[in-house]
Image (cartoon, rainbow, N blue to C red):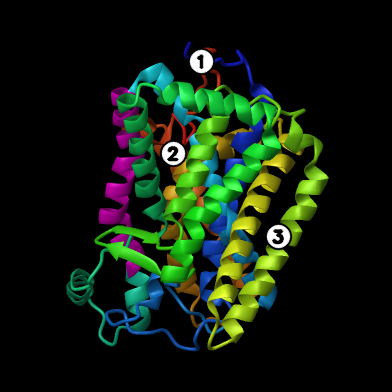
Amino acid sequence: MNAEPRWTPRETRSIAAIDNLRSVIILFVVGVHTLLPYFSFLPSTPGAFDAPPWLWRSFPLIDAHRLPLGFDIFSAWVDVFAMATFFLVSGLFVWPCLARKGAARFISERALRIGLPFVVGVLVLLPIATVPTYLQTATHPSFADFWQRFLALPFWPSGPLWFLWVLFAADILAAGIYSFFPRANDVVVRLGYAARVHPWKFGAGVIAASAAGYIPLALLFGPFPWGQFGPISIQLSRPAQYAVYFFAGAVIGACGIEHELTGPNGLLARHWRRALVAAIAGFGLWLLASAITMMNASVSLPLRAATAAAYVVACFMNCWCALAVTVRFAASRSTVWDSLRDNAYGIYLVHFLFSIWLQYALLGTEVSALAKVAFVFAATLTLSWGTVAVLRRLPGFALVLGNGRRTARSLPSLIHPAMPFAD
């Protein structure tokens, strides 16, 4: 007999925690992008716009003023777990959506919510966001010169929007599994029940699968390089890692998220202190291993494998810590958090456009890096939040960005029309 999904009619506390976690991570992403021109390890001068190694793809501008080392460490910490957590959270809502809507409707709506913003973003927003990078090194800047050099690039910049195509690909894969493998629903639901009953074993399985997917690619390509074909880009060591977290989320959410693992009284909420200690220890271990690896010109294969394994552990521990802390302490609503929740997706889509032009405007000014970061972050968040709030009032944009309204449907109550990485 096939196991059928069973959703708890109302899971308001867990949903609030997931909403708030997603919003906080988006704030982290905005914060890291605000820091980019000011990292201590950047070269003293920017490289050419149209010549290798195109460092500006990761660091679009380089400012003469630099931040203390602690900000580099903060950025590394966010990089370790933030995107994996995004994929986990996105996966939580996939199976209920597929069960309620079917694969065809699910993919068509995802194409509107994710595919369309990706296309518009890379074709319209990214060229505009690339102009400051060009202006930083241009001798005789002009629109014609910029456009000629931009089109001559061997790639099309996608910036932070790379996440959208990867998430859309994961959604298509999940829909294909749901449609073409009749027993897939039974398997996923049974795994979801197993995660409830044996959460420690489930966590160990996620670590093992993540290690199997990440370590070989990290050894083959290195932990940092990106691959790009046109606007399609991804960090070469991480596609399997992201897939593991996405489908781990799908398994957890297959039968609802208010249960022994992620519920407000579940395992993570009860053991948040242990999760916090493990997260700090895991990140510290990876940081130490990475420092040793980068300081040695010739690194042995066992040391590189150990560093990759440390990343896997750090990613898992910090992702699970983020879940633990939010389901324990952030399972409530407020006007500000609800507004951030409703506008978070749009903020993610447009924030880099504001941040890079603000950073460019501050180049050459005799202001400390800390003051620049504080101003750029506050202005970027304010402008992005306000812009998206206005756009969401327009019917066409509301279809993509969400209108912020909640329905009274209880099957499943997990699904919120305004959630950027869900419905």
Q: Is residue 137 above or below residue 247?
A: below
**In front: mark 1 or mark 2?**
1
The answer to whether residue 157 is magenta is: no
Q: Amino acid at mark 1?
A: Ala
Q: Amino acid at mark 2?
A: Val
In the depicted view, which residue is nearer to us: 376 or 251?
Answer: 251
Q: Amino acid at mark 3?
A: Gly
**In front: mark 3 or mark 2?**
3
In the depicted view, which residue is nearer to us: 401 or 324?
Answer: 324
Return the disc, 1 or 2, that comes first in the chain's sequence.
Answer: 1
Q: Main secondary structure of the magenta part?
A: helix
Question: Left or right: 321 with respect to 193?
Answer: right
Q: Which percent across, then down, holds residue 337?
A: 64, 37
Q: Which quadrant holds residue 74? A: bottom right
Question: Left or right: 242 with respect to 159?
Answer: right
Q: Which quadrant holds residue 16? A: top right
Q: Which residue is mark 2?
A: 390
Q: Is residue 122 above or below residue 43?
A: above
Q: Quadrant of the C terminus?
A: top left
Per the model, the C-alpha gap separating discs 3 and 2 is 41 Å
Residues shaded magenta: 103-130
Q: Which residue is mark 1?
A: 3
Residue that appears at 74% across and 29% down: 264
Per the image, label 2 sits on a secondary structure element best described as helix
Which mark is on residue 282? 3
